[in-house]
Amino acid sequence: MKLILASSSPRRKDILDLFKISYKIDTTDVEDNLTLKSKPHINAMTSAFMKANAVFEKNIEEKDDIIVLGADTIVSTGDYEFGKPKDDEDQIKTLKFLSGKIHDVITGFAIIGKDFKFTDYVKTTVKFKELSDDMIINYVKTREGVDKAGSYTLNGISSVFVEKVDGDYFNVIGLPISRIYDVMKEKFDLDLLKRN
């Protein structure tokens, strides 16, 4: 079986690269963080499924030999959802809103094979410390949060914003690899730890 990652996210690629497995990256024009009128975990899973399914259909001639993995990450406070920021102003607004608050990072994922379609999500709770305007402005100038849900990442300089993380660290980065490992092994007999 060949694994296809339906994402151009460098962070998702970095996580899969930890396993030193063979896979390819293929993407479509399905948008991240689609504006859906549902609960955040449903939105994330729906978006992930749409991405994975579009890539599966694009590679339909190989359907007997491929597994496609798609993911989408959303930051949610319950009342509000934050995907990738549109611009610097949006990034500043998001970080000011998250300052001093607890929020959930939800990554929906979809795994699609010839006879199997699976979706799930993982939720991690993150607490930000109080952020000064200077911290936010200086961070935004680094451009680190431009392509990240919630305008930040745990594995970068914005880690200084984080007071506490409860749950899967890799989920916040964009790929809940522990849960994905379990599903791949159980449903597809694909062990990401096994060397060829």
Image (cartoon, rainbow, N blue to C red):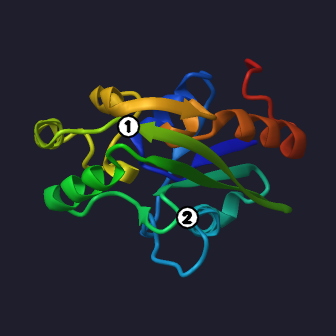
Q: Quick one: label 1, few (<14), some, or many (20+) residues within 10 Å?
A: many
The amino acid marked with disc number 2 is Lys
Pinpoint residue 94: horizontal percent, then vertical percent. Answer: 29, 56
Pinpoint residue 63: horizontal percent, then vertical percent. Answer: 74, 60
* SS category of the residue bearing label 1: loop
Distance of label 1 from label 2 (alpha carbons): 22 Å
Pinpoint residue 40: horizontal percent, then vertical percent. Answer: 57, 65
Between 106 and 21, the residue placed more toward the observer is: 106
Side of 73 where 142 appears, left or right: left
Q: Is residue 55 visible?
A: no
Q: Is residue 14 visible?
A: yes
The tag earlier along the polypeptide, 1 or 2, is: 2
Side of 70 where 158 appears, left or right: left
Between 71 and 159, the residue placed more toward the observer is: 159
Between 128 and 74, the residue placed more toward the observer is: 128
The amino acid marked with disc number 1 is Thr
Q: Quadrant of residue 90?
A: bottom left
Q: Is residue 167 above or below residue 19?
A: below
- Report the mark closest to the observer, 1 or 2: 1
Pinpoint residue 67: horizontal percent, then vertical percent. Answer: 71, 50
Please state the total of marks drawn on the protein image.
2
In the orientation shown, which residue stands out farthest toward the top? Answer: 195
Q: Which residue is mark 2?
A: 51
Residue 153's label in the rendered image is 1
The quadrant the C terminus occupies is top right
Side of 195 where 185 appears, left or right: right
Q: Residue at x 50, y 40 (%)?
A: 126
Residue 142's label in the rendered image is none
